[in-house]
């Protein structure tokens, strides 16, 4: 029997027994929050939950560490898949005594994700599912967080997610979007933006999954059925096969990125530069009409 490096128990994950793995994992998140000054115990924190493992683990640990949290989920109204995720999330939140807010695409925009894609397609506009979903989710999360007077939005992004995002922006040469990444997303503080923080920033997906399974959280471990053909998924698969040959590739990317990030953020927005707002919805935006309103307007036009 291989023993834990800290005690005499049986090894469970990378040299640690179950008890010491849990301790290691929770400490890592606590240390990340402290190091990057992500959250305080006085703040009202909204955790963006999908019903998947990352955000479920995040909500569980923040609650355990004594943060004031509520959960919010944006339902893209994808048949079956999102139904099951939302049922799981309801069950988890009930057990953990976390207040849950459910916001749906259908309720907020009049359309489910499928219909949005179809409508746009019939107008000759092809936008990938993941792009539409991402834009509308970010928009609704920020809008609802402001309405609820939340001081922070916490998301379940892992080290793997972040390494993929860094790589995607590198491959596309998009330095401005890259500057928006990091443990605290965004570049400048603005009253229109509820700051988004990523307490799982230094956690590998493998660790998160192990923790989630150990705690028997009710989650589906499959990826979103719409994700398979997205650019992110292609980059993700390439990086997985790369990492099989070269250990710690993703950690190396993140370590490098964290070193250049302060410079990137400084260069992206010059001092005194102001945030501009969408003329339609009033949400913060770099363009006169934000991406979400651009999509929604195209849908409206179709109806007329
Ligand atoms: Zn041990
Ligand atoms: Zn807008």
Image (cartoon, rainbow, N blue to C red):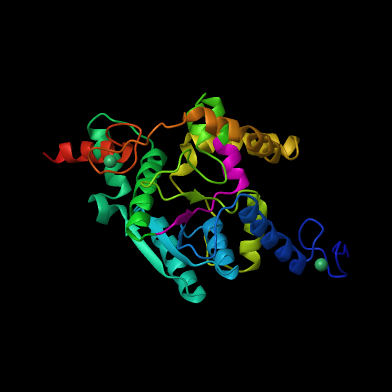
**Residue 253 in the image: x percent, y percent?**
66, 35
Determine whether 47 is above or below 97 in the image.
Answer: above
Give, as a single range, the part of the protein colored magenta. Answer: 150-165
Which residue is more in the foreground, 86 or 96? 96
Residue 155 lies left or right of residue 123; in this view the side is right
Residue at 52% from the left image edge and 58% from the top image edge? 55
Quarter of the image where ligand 2 sits: top left
Residue 164 magenta-highlighted: yes
User: For this view, does 201 lie left or right of residue 113?
Assistant: right
Rendered-image quadrant of the N terminus = bottom right
Question: Does the segment drawn in magenta span residue 256?
Answer: no
- Of 304 and 66, which appears nearest the observer? 66
Residue 44 or residue 93, whichever sits in front: 44
User: Which corner quadrant of the image does residue 54 belong to?
Assistant: bottom right
Q: Quadrant of residue 135?
A: top left
Q: Is residue 79 visible?
A: no
Extreme residue in the left direction: 304
Residue nearest the viewer, comparing 174 with 130: 174
Residue at (22, 31) in percent of width and height? 123
Q: Report the number of numbered marks.
A: 0
Place of residue 74 in the rendered image (x, y in percent of width and height, measured from the top left):
38, 55
In this rendering, the answer to whether 239 lies above or below 76 is: above
List x then y, in percent, for residue 184: 53, 46
The quarter of the picture where the C terminus appears is top left
Q: Would you place residue 32 above or below residue 4 in this image?
A: above
Compared with residue 196, is residue 276 higher up or lower down, i.e. above or below? Answer: above
Picture coordinates of residue 86, whole percent (x, y): 41, 63
Is there any visible trace of residue 143 in the rendered image? yes
**Given the current orientation, which residue lies at the most extreme front position?**
272
């Amino acid at each position: 029997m291989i023993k834990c490096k800290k005690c005499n128990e049986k090894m469970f994950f990378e040299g640690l027994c179950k008890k010491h793995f849990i301790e290691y994992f929770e400490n890592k998140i606590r240390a990340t929050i402290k190091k990057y000054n992500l959250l305080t115990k006085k703040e009202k924190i909204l955790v963006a939950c999908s019903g998947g493992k990352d955000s479920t683990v995040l909500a569980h640990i923040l609650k355990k560490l004594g943060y004031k949290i509520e959960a919010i989920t944006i339902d893209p109204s994808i048949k079956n898949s999102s139904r099951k995720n939302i049922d799981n999330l309801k069950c988890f939140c009930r057990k953990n005594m976390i207040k849950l807010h459910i916001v749906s695409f259908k309720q907020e925009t009049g359309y489910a994700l499928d219909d949005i894609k179809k409508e746009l397609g019939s107008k000759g506009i092809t936008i990938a599912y993941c792009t539409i979903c991402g834009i509308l989710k970010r928009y609704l999360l920020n809008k609802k967080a402001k309405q609820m007077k939340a001081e922070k939005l916490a998301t379940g992004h892992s080290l793997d997610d972040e390494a993929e995002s860094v790589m995607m922006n590198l491959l596309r040469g998009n330095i401005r979007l890259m500057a928006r990444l990091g443990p605290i997303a965004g570049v400048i503080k603005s009253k229109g933006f509820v700051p988004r923080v990523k307490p799982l920033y230094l956690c590998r997906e493998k660790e998160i999954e192990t923790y989630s399974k150990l705690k028997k959280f009710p989650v589906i471990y499959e990826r979103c059925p719409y994700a398979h053909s997205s650019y992110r998924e292609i980059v993700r698969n390439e990086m997985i096969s790369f990492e099989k040959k070269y250990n710690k590739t993703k950690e190396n990317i993140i370590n490098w990125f964290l070193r250049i990030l302060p410079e990137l953020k400084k260069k992206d927005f010059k001092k005194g530069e102001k945030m501009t707002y969408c003329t339609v919805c009033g949400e913060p935006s770099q363009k006169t009409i934000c991406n979400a309103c651009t999509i929604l307007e195209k849908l409206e036009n179709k109806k007329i």
